[in-house]
Amino acid sequence: MNCKVCNSISDVFANGKILNKYFIIYYQCKHCGFTQTEEPYWLKDVYSQAINNSDIGMLSRNIANTIVSRAIISVFFNPEARFVDYGGGYGIFVRLMRDYGFAFYRLDKYCQNLFTKGFDFEESAHDTLELMTAFEVFEHFPNPSDNLDELLKISSNILFTTELVPASNPKPEEWWYYGLDHGQHISFYTVKSLQYLANSKGLNLYTNSRNFHLFTKKQISPFLFRLLCNNKLSTLCNLFNRRSSLLAVDYEAITGKRLI
């Protein structure tokens, strides 16, 4: 197969069994290190429900992402602007960010909105967006370069999470992130592959070389970005960048009544 990031030749890397029934092949690019599955013919089965049953870390992950996102937005972007969470799931992250005073909207074509009804993203209603977040989304992309183009139509600043392939280069049964039990993860990145994506779109890449990454045209401090990806340091930063919650405003917008 050709690499879906840099278009170099990808060699067979490993075999894996997903959903306890599909034996599939994984390919790895020797040029950029990107690992991909064979063409994912099984996706129609794995997305019968948007959130897989083994995703038991959803709440803690959203809380952690909120802490880091608040700090990164406060330091590098305009906190008064509008934002969108791509692949926003049930709307937990958007609700938390709005509670902390950031005008976030949710965008998810496949998952039911439980927590932020009335705050789904409509492209026609927003002239400009300061930043898009996309947490645990990139590993689901069947064609990362094309999928990234779709995101860039909405915002040129994308803060996202995806676990990078460890230096030990584990096989599917040796690393939980391959998600053999649910089969939804089909794309796995290295810093080099993310850098190639950034370069191909005229963007800068900032990363903590583990799970938090930023595509942007801005030039910021890589060192400071890495610091703010640490929950403890982000929490400290947030103490000095408090904002008024949108909870009361949102309540009035939904009900027509003031929250007393």
Image (spheres, rainbow, N blue to C red):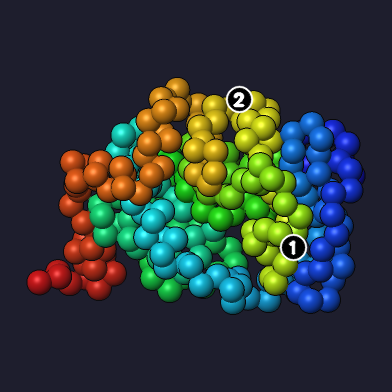
Q: Which residue is mark 2?
A: 202
Label 2 residue SS: loop
Mark 2 burial class by Cα count in 10 Å: few <14, some 14-19, many 20+: few
Tell me if residue 244 comes above or below residue 48 in the rendering: above
The numbered disc on residue 43 is none
Which residue appears at 69% of the width and 36% of the height?
Answer: 193
Residue 148 image position (x, y, % from top left): 64, 42
Residue 161 image position (x, y, % from top left): 53, 49
- Is the N terminus in the top left, top right, bottom left or bottom right quadrant? top right
Which residue appears at 58% of the width and 50% of the height?
Answer: 162
Identify which residue, 206 or 117, lies in the foreground.
Answer: 206
Tell me if residue 210 comes above or below residue 179 in the rendering: above
Q: Position of 130 compared to 179: left or right?
A: left
Residue 175 image position (x, y, % from top left): 67, 58
Mark 1 burial class by Cα count in 10 Å: few <14, some 14-19, many 20+: some
- Is the C terminus in the top left, top right, bottom left or bottom right quadrant? bottom left
Residue furthest out toward the left: 260
Q: Position of 66 compared to 54: left or right?
A: left
How many circles with numbers are drawn on the protein? 2
Which amino acid, mark 1? Glu
Residue 244 image position (x, y, % from top left): 18, 52
The numbered disc on residue 173 is 1
Question: Which of the 4 image quadrants contains residue 19?
Answer: bottom right
Which amino acid, mark 2? Gly
